[in-house]
Image (tube, helix red, strand yellow):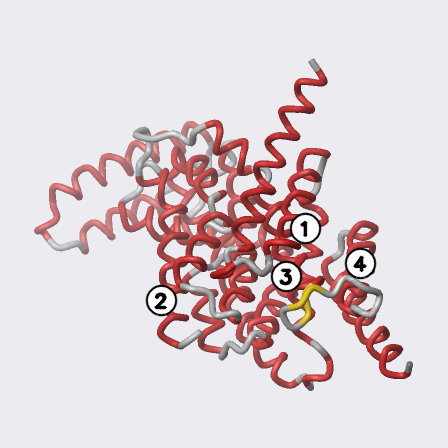
């Protein structure tokens, strides 16, 4: 991505985000949130977050790599287990990185 | 009480005479607010004191945000962004999940439209926050509305709206309380973005620090699955993402997100029907 495209994308994303934030504060009384949107929004965090993380774990250099040889996938699964048990961001980060380093070390020694 | 009145009248006295019609209404509304404040409580706090009480309330949350900010900076650096570019994202977008989700798109060279569309879907929730805050900000000037809107962030909204809805902050003090809550969050977010980029650049490449990005999303995604319907949303999104990742124009993420949301809605109505 070129520098110009990058800044265009960021300014566009910023403008859209500001429009969403200011929307009903500016239009008070003239517009309401449709109930359907309110229901749908409940599922955005779970859907988006999962949609981001899955390709990052399963794809390596643009190719699907769903095997025990994929250290990132295994370390990611360990991080999911830590997140389920502790709900602590720092432990997930620390534990996940440690798991990746350990798996990479094992992979190199084999 | 007297100090507030004196400050208000001094402020109006300093303004240029060309804006006198506006001043009249402003003086009246201040007087009305002060009457209301007197009825509610014996000692209305000064803007500075209200600002500080907001800052104190948010301090632990602001500290807890630091690892996420550092992780964003580090992940941005891992995606090939400079400190200025990472800071630009934090200033203009100011939304952790959207910024983090945009990183893989940006480093894969996605088009402007795809980045903007993805950020739009992730940040749609701000419309709900805007709706909830609107009645509390309705008497403010356009400038104040714009400033406070820019500062709507998940943590800020959560802290402010509970106090506002319980009536714990008087109407004339709400903007100062909101600023007091928002500015520490903004400061931590911007400082940690830059700090994270430099932290990331010290670390040798063999440490695979780009793995911080999926880890952060795991830490956020697991608590987002609260019940069977949100679980279905995650499942549909995950399976779609697995097969849509090679879609042209990097449209995989947005496709998977929309399929996931639809899956959640379908699961919700199925669960409702069964419970009837």
Judging from the image, mark 3 belongs to the subunit labelled: B
> Between tags 1 and 3, which lies in front?
1
| Mark 3 neighbour class, 10 Å CA radius: few under 14, some 14 to 19, many 20 or more | some
| Mark 4 neighbour class, 10 Å CA radius: few under 14, some 14 to 19, many 20 or more | some
Give the Cα distance between marks 2 and 1.
29 Å
Judging from the image, mark 2 belongs to the subunit labelled: A
Query: Where does residue A69 sit, x and y in percent of width and height?
Result: 82, 70
Sequence-wise, the earlier of marks 1 and 3 is: 3
Residue positioned 35% across, 48% down in the render: A19
Q: Is residue A4 left or right of residue B26?
A: right
Eyeballing the image, is B270 above or below B167? above
Judging from the image, mark 4 belongs to the subunit labelled: A
Give the Cα distance between marks 4 and 3.
28 Å
| Mark 1 neighbour class, 10 Å CA radius: few under 14, some 14 to 19, many 20 or more | many
Looking at the rendered structure, whether the residues under marks 1 and 4 are on a common chain is answered as no
Sequence-wise, the earlier of marks 2 and 4 is: 2
Do callouts 1 and 4 mark residues in contact (Cβ within 8 Å)? no
Do callouts 2 and 3 mark residues in contact (Cβ within 8 Å)? no
Give the Cα distance between marks 2 and 3.
32 Å
| Mark 2 neighbour class, 10 Å CA radius: few under 14, some 14 to 19, many 20 or more | some
Dot label at residue B42: none
Q: Secondary structure at mark 3?
A: helix
* Residue that numbered label 1 is attached to: B221
* Residue that numbered label 4 is attached to: A77
> Between tags 4 and 3, which lies in front?
4
Residue positioned 62% across, 53% down in the render: B241
Give the Cα distance between marks 1 and 4.
13 Å
Do callouts 2 and 1 mark residues in contact (Cβ within 8 Å)? no
Give the Cα distance between marks 1 and 3.
21 Å
Q: Secondary structure at mark 4?
A: helix
């Amino acid at each position: 991505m070129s520098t110009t495209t990058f800044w265009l994308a960021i300014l566009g994303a910023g403008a859209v985000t500001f429009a969403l934030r200011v929307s009903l504060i500016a239009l008070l009384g003239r517009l309401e949130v449709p109930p359907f949107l309110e229901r749908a929004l409940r599922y955005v965090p779970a859907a988006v977050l999962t949609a981001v993380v899955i390709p990052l774990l399963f794809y390596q250099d643009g190719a699907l790599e769903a095997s025990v040889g994929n250290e990132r996938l295994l370390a990611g699964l360990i991080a999911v287990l830590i997140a389920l048990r502790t709900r602590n961001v720092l432990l997930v980060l620390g534990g996940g990185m440690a798991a990746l380093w350990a798996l990479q070390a094992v992979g190199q020694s084999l | 009480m007297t100090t507030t009145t004196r400050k208000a009248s001094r402020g109006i006295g300093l303004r240029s005479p060309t804006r006198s019609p506006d001043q009249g209404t402003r003086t009246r509304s201040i007087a009305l607010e002060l009457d209301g404040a007197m009825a509610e409580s014996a000692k209305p706090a000064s803007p500075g004191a209200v600002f500080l009480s907001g800052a104190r309330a948010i301090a632990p949350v602001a500290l807890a945000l630091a690892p996420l900010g550092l992780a964003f900076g580090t992940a941005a650096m891992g995606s090939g962004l400079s400190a200025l570019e990472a800071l630009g994202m934090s200033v203009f977008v100011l939304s952790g999940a959207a910024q983090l989700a945009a990183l893989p798109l940006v480093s894969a060279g996605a088009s402007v439209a795809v980045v903007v569309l993805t950020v739009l879907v992730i940040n749609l929730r701000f419309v709900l926050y805007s709706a909830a805050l609107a009645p509390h900000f309705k008497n403010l000037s356009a400038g104040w509305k714009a400033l406070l809107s820019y500062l709507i962030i998940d943590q800020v909204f959560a802290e402010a709206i509970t106090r506002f809805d319980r009536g714990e902050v008087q109407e004339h003090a709400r903007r100062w309380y909101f600023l007091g809550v928002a500015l520490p969050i903004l400061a931590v977010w911007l400082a940690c973005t830059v700090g994270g980029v430099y932290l990331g650049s010290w670390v040798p490449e063999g440490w695979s620090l780009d793995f911080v990005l999926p880890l952060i999303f795991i830490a956020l995604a697991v608590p987002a699955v609260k019940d069977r319907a949100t679980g279905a949303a995650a499942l549909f999104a995950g399976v779609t993402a697995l097969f849509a990742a090679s879609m042209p124009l990097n449209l995989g993420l947005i496709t998977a997100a929309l399929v996931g949301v639809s899956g959640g809605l379908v699961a919700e109505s199925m669960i409702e029907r069964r419970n009837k």
